[in-house]
Image (cartoon, rainbow, N blue to C red):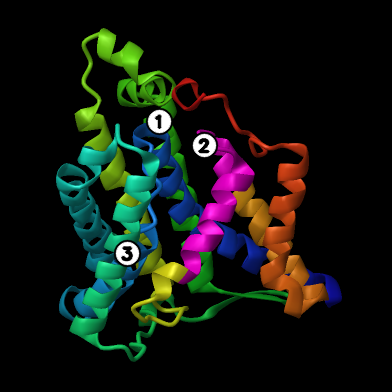
């Protein structure tokens, strides 16, 4: 019985790792290609959650599941076109200030539109219930989240590592000057990566809307953990971010079982340990433009 409880905690930890992963992948992609440390990334996650509350009563959960990340991704295109693009070659401090201000604007905008009080949102009826396998019990909704995140990460990997689009993106991460010398403009690729990264944050907002408290500052709460995942995984490494997200999730899940009060601190301790032995992160790559 105790082993089953530990297994449930590990699965819950993996679930935490999965939604850290959806946020961290977008952060890593945007930073690797554009050099923008997007402090507003958590705000897109919050916007995805609020869109879920607004859209589900009108078009239902299945349509919202598609529409909300797409709308957030379109917002990412607008922000890339009119804000991020001006700062790709600027001092990184300026993009930090920009995205910090953008995060504040988004948070206050949500507060003005929806109020400061948390919004209630219940999961769809058809995803309620639990899976029973002997003594093992796990909610269908959480299994759905794990499945959706697995599919999303697989599709992104195929896009980045198995398509001509991905080859240009990876070359642009390593050496944008060389890509430019070949006559390839990175601007449309940056637009696509911004839409993809921001859309992933919106997808995380849709998935988590029914199991977290929806409030204007919810994005700030998850952003720190997402940065921890990126640091542990290593800049520029797809599988580094994936491994770090799952590792952080499992460590948190097991810490909740053995020492609940230390669950939040466990991921920071893990980050310190990794950086002591691997300053570039677990799978960090040498990126020429940042050398």
187 versus 146 height, above or below = above
Instruction: Say which quarter of the image contains residue 86.
Output: top left
Q: Secondary structure at mark 2?
A: helix
Label 1: how many residues lie within 10 Å, few (<14), some (14-19) or many (20+)? Answer: some
Q: Is residue 6 left or right of residue 104?
A: right
Q: Do the CB atoms of the residues marked 2 and 1 lie less than 8 Å apart?
A: yes
For image coordinates 51% across by 53% down, the residue present is 21
Q: Residues under labels 2 and 1: Cα distance?
A: 9 Å
**Residue range corresponding to the magenta coloring:** 221-242
Q: Horizontal and vertical percent for residue 178? A: 34, 11
Asked whether the viewer can see residue 61, the reply is no
Q: Horizontal and vertical percent for residue 187? A: 21, 30
The residue indicated by pointer 3 is 103
Q: Magenta stretch mostly in which secondary structure?
A: helix
Q: Is residue 228 magenta?
A: yes
Q: Is residue 261 left or right of residue 110?
A: right
Q: Residues under labels 3 and 1: Cα distance?
A: 28 Å
Q: Do the CB atoms of the residues marked 3 and 1 lie less than 8 Å apart?
A: no
Q: Nearer the viewer, mark 2 or mark 3?
A: 3
Q: Is residue 237 left or right of residue 279?
A: left
Q: Secondary structure at mark 1?
A: helix
243 versus 111 height, above or below = above
Q: Quadrant of the N terminus?
A: bottom right
Q: Residues under labels 2 and 3: Cα distance?
A: 25 Å
Q: Secondary structure at mark 3?
A: helix
Q: Which mark is residue 238?
A: 2
Which of pointers 2 and 3 lies earlier in the amino acid sequence?
Answer: 3
For image coordinates 57% across by 37% down, the residue present is 239
The residue indicated by pointer 1 is 160
Nearer to me, 65 or 74: 74
Q: Horizontal and vertical percent for residue 95? A: 33, 47
């Amino acid at each position: 019985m105790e082993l089953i409880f530990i297994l449930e905690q590990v699965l819950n930890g993996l679930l935490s790792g999965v939604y850290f992963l959806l946020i961290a992948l977008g952060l890593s992609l945007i930073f690797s290609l554009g050099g923008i440390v997007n402090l507003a990334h958590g705000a897109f996650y919050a916007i995805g959650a609020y869109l879920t509350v607004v859209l589900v009563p009108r078009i239902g959960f299945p349509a919202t599941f598609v529409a909300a990340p797409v709308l957030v991704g379109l917002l990412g295109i607008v922000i890339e076109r009119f804000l991020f693009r001006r700062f790709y070659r600027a001092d990184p401090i300026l993009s930090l200030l920009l995205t910090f201000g953008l995060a504040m604007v988004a948070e206050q905008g949500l507060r003005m539109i929806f109020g400061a009080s948390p919004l209630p949102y219940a999961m769809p009826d058809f995803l309620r219930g639990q899976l029973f396998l002997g003594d093992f019990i796990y909610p269908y909704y959480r299994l759905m989240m794990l499945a959706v995140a697995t599919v999303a990460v697989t599709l992104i990997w195929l896009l980045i590592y198995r398509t001509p689009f991905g080859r240009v993106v990876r070359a642009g991460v390593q050496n944008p000057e060389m890509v430019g010398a070949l006559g390839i403009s990175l601007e449309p690729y940056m637009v696509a990566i911004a839409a993809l990264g921001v859309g992933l944050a919106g997808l995380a907002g849709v998935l988590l809307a029914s199991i977290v408290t929806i409030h204007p500052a919810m994005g700030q709460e998850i952003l720190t953990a997402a940065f921890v995942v990126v640091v542990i995984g290593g800049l520029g490494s797809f599988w580094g971010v994936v491994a770090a997200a799952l590792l952080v999730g499992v460590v948190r899940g097991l810490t909740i079982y053995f020492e609940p009060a230390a669950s939040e601190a466990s991921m920071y301790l893990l980050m310190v340990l990794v950086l002591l032995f691997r300053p570039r992160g677990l799978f960090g790559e040498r990126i020429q433009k940042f050398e």
